Image (cartoon, helix red, strand yellow):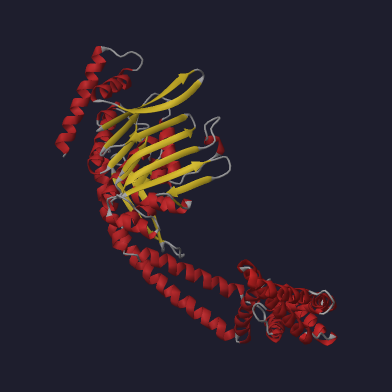
Amino acid sequence: MLLNLHVKNLAIIDEIEVDFAEHLNVLTGETGAGKSIIIGSINIALGGKTAKDMIRKDAEFALVELTFLVDDERIRSELEEMGISFEDNILLISRKITSTRTINRMNGESVTIAMIKKAAGLMIDIHGQNEQQSLLHKAKHMEIVDRYAKEQMNGKDVELAKSYRCYIEWKEELSDHEIPEEQRLREVSFLKYELEEIENANLVAGEEEELAQKYRKLSNATEIAQGLSEIYNMMSIENGAVSEKTGEGIRILSKISEYDGRVSEFWNQLSEIDSLVTDFNRDISDYMDSFEVGAEELAEVEERLDLVRGIKAKYGSSTEEVFAYRDKIRSQLVKYQDYEAYRQELQEKIAKEEKKLIKLSKEITAIRKKCAKVLEKEITQALIDLNFMQVKFEIAVRPKKEYSAKGMDEIEFMISTNPGEELKSLGSSASGGELSRIMLAVKAVLAEHDNIESMIFDEIDVGISGRTAQMVAEKMALIGGRHQVICISHLAQIAAMADTQFLIEKENQDEHTHSQIRRLSQEESIQELARILGGAQITDSVVNSAREMKELAMEIKAKSK
């Protein structure tokens, strides 16, 4: 359930905090007060598009946060598999928008937009103002049927999509490697040459670095030898060398140390230094004795280094990349050398996967047809509840010749809203207001099957009035009895059904405009109903009508429980 919405510095919102309640939450307000911005901010938090101009003028950033209570163990388990940790079953989704980037977090952890959208799909269903237009597309019809049939699918739809990807990849591979015999022979010759060149090089990981270091040493051998010789002479041979001076100092300290204990410490220190100097002289002498450099060795190292670098320049910037390329051309060479066997193997794979595709597609078609029959009855009843009194509704599941990741079906919703009319596609027979009610009917049915706890409806009442508006209000209240519903509405009938009502207002102070939202008391809800009913002038009779409407709505809701 959505517990809280916090928005800061977004469009005309300075900062708002909304605590939503269970059941039916209705948001009302004057046109232009910022109702759509409230729903828009929820959409942004759930992964919607962001833009720099969303940030309120003179603000450094905009912030949108949603707090959910996740009671469903299955949903919590899926979120934990995504790497989200929980405390007290609370999920906090936040998006901070700056002029250069957007920071996305869930429970304090940085996440991707894809993760936020996946989490949102588990917990909330949003019906935007224009979503009913998606009903004009057959792809949406299939999505609805498959959502309804998810449990019966038992993962077959996922398996089918995976099988289709394999099928297409192998067909593309076969097509990409269809080459004439002459070209195949040239390719074999070229691949052999490359493979031999790489294998003959006998590359070793880290070899280039070692060779480069050895080359630096050998090419600067004379300078190194001269430097070491100078240091050795300074330390141990010439008159006044370090070793002579330390030895002389030790002799002096040895004579006087018996007179002063502190002098004994100096003797110990200088003795250690003398020992280190002696060791240093011996080590440098040994190294100089072994330091022999020949022009032949330098040439060998230089030649090997050039070879290693040449191979990497042609086949990869690192030894690992060269080895990866070697393995790739080995595989290609096997294919081209035994081309017919390779083609036959691919064709067998394609045929096997095609057989699997056909089997899965038929099974899924059977599931869709079975579920579509049940779904069309439930949607038909929901449409009748929404004042489609003589409606006929059918879900047509038709076969297609070509494969797809969804199988071999085409699904289309057909409807007739008047007696004697033939069934027609939604796009050719339903008006805007009718599409809105049809989508509400679909949402109401699906809500009972997929366990999504929270639903948002942004102006579901567009294009309806009178008795139809009352029936839509009753349907919203019915859904709200089993789910958390958040609804923006201009209709008094829907507002009257609210379990919790919020008023969105726009305030102008010192040339500063901002939107505010507040929860209404029972009496304030009646006054807001009166405003919706009465318009500019709210008389006592309008207030009384509003009070009566609210009381009647409560009676209807009580009877439906």
Q: Residue furthest front?
A: 259
Residue at the left extreme of this rendering = 559
Instruction: Return the residue nearer the eye: 154 or 350.
Output: 154
Image spot of residue 206 (x, y percent): 66, 77
Where does the image place residue 180, in percent across and percent down from the top left? 67, 79
Total marks placed: 0
Nearer the observer, 222 or 71: 222
Q: Quadrant of residue 225?
A: bottom right
For this view, does 79 lie left or right of residue 265?
Answer: left
| Residue closest to the eye, 481 or 123 | 123
- Left or right: 23 as drawn, with respect to 227: left
Residue lying at 30% horizontally and 43% vertically, measured from the top left: 441
Residue 186 screen position, x and y as percent? 72, 82
Quarter of the image with the N terminus is top left
Kindly indicate the quadrant of the structure image that contains residue 367. Answer: bottom left
Residue 209 in sight in this render: no
